[in-house]
Amino acid sequence: MDLDFQVVTIMNLSPVTIINYGMGNCGSVVNMIRFIGGEARLSNSPDDVRTADKLILPGVGAFDAGMKALRETGMDVAIREAVTKRGASLLGICLGMQLLTESSEEGNLPGLALVPGRVKRFDVHSFGLRVPHMGWNEVQPVRSSVLLDPNDEEHRFYFVHSYHVECDDPRDVAGITHYGYDFTSAFEHDQVLGVQFHPEKSHRFGMALLKRFLEV
């Protein structure tokens, strides 16, 4: 990890619960949050999730496998209750972002449907590009949002994915990235947020983003 961060001044950061459902890169997320001085609690308990004020849903893998894991652990119901009944803030990372939508071309199961939209497979072969989209790329903020400051000179994050989100409401789009064409790499729908990239692997840029989320 790049140790030349210089960006983080720790103030009052809210504690956050990391949802452990067997599909996420949870350890790296916990380590990054603790590195910036935040309080991260890793939990596989639906009761913990249901009563949390701030949640992160990581995710690596296939859409249906992720939804099946959430259903089998009861996390799907707990997440919906935390967000819709208690107003908890929720950040989805990579697959976690995709699971917040209604459906995916990658599978047949419905998503959590907390954000109107669906997940599409990259169609970039005509541009001579490979799938998955992997490596560092820039995110362009399209409006003011919790996660991205349009006044920052640069937003660079690490990506690994073959699918991307299409939001039904363009007002939910917070950031876009170009890979053959522009796609939604960050969204914000009320208190439900998602990023297609991995902030826990994105050095000082990821630290700044997670810090902004914890400060909400």
Image: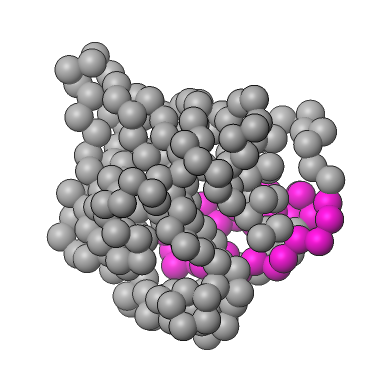
> Could you tell me how many numbered marks the image carries?
0
Image spot of residue 64 (x, y percent) = 25, 60
Write down the quadrant of residue 99 in the picture: bottom left
48 lies above or below 99: below
Query: Which residue is at the front of the view, 38 or 141?
Result: 141
163 lies above or below 4: below
Relative placement, left or right, of 154 versus 33 is left
Image spot of residue 125 (x, y percent) = 19, 21
Write down the quadrant of residue 152 in the picture: top right
- Quadrant, the N terminus: top right
Query: Does residue 64 appear in this view?
Result: no
Q: Is residue 13 magenta?
A: yes
Q: Residue at x 20, y 29 (%)?
A: 123
183 lies above or below 110: above
Write down the quadrant of residue 151 in the picture: top right
Type of colouring: one colour
Relative placement, left or right, of 62 versus 157 is left
Q: Residue at x 30, y 37 (%)?
A: 162
- Quadrant, the C terminus: bottom right
Question: Which span of residues is magenta-colored?
Answer: 10-37
Q: Is residue 202 magenta?
A: no
Q: Residue at x 84, y 56 (%)?
A: 11
Image spot of residue 179 (x, y percent) = 34, 24
* Furthest-top residue in this view: 128
Query: Does residue 89 appear in this view?
Result: yes
Q: Residue at x 42, y 34 (%)?
A: 176
Relative placement, left or right, of 180 versus 196 is left
Image spot of residue 119 (x, y percent) = 26, 48
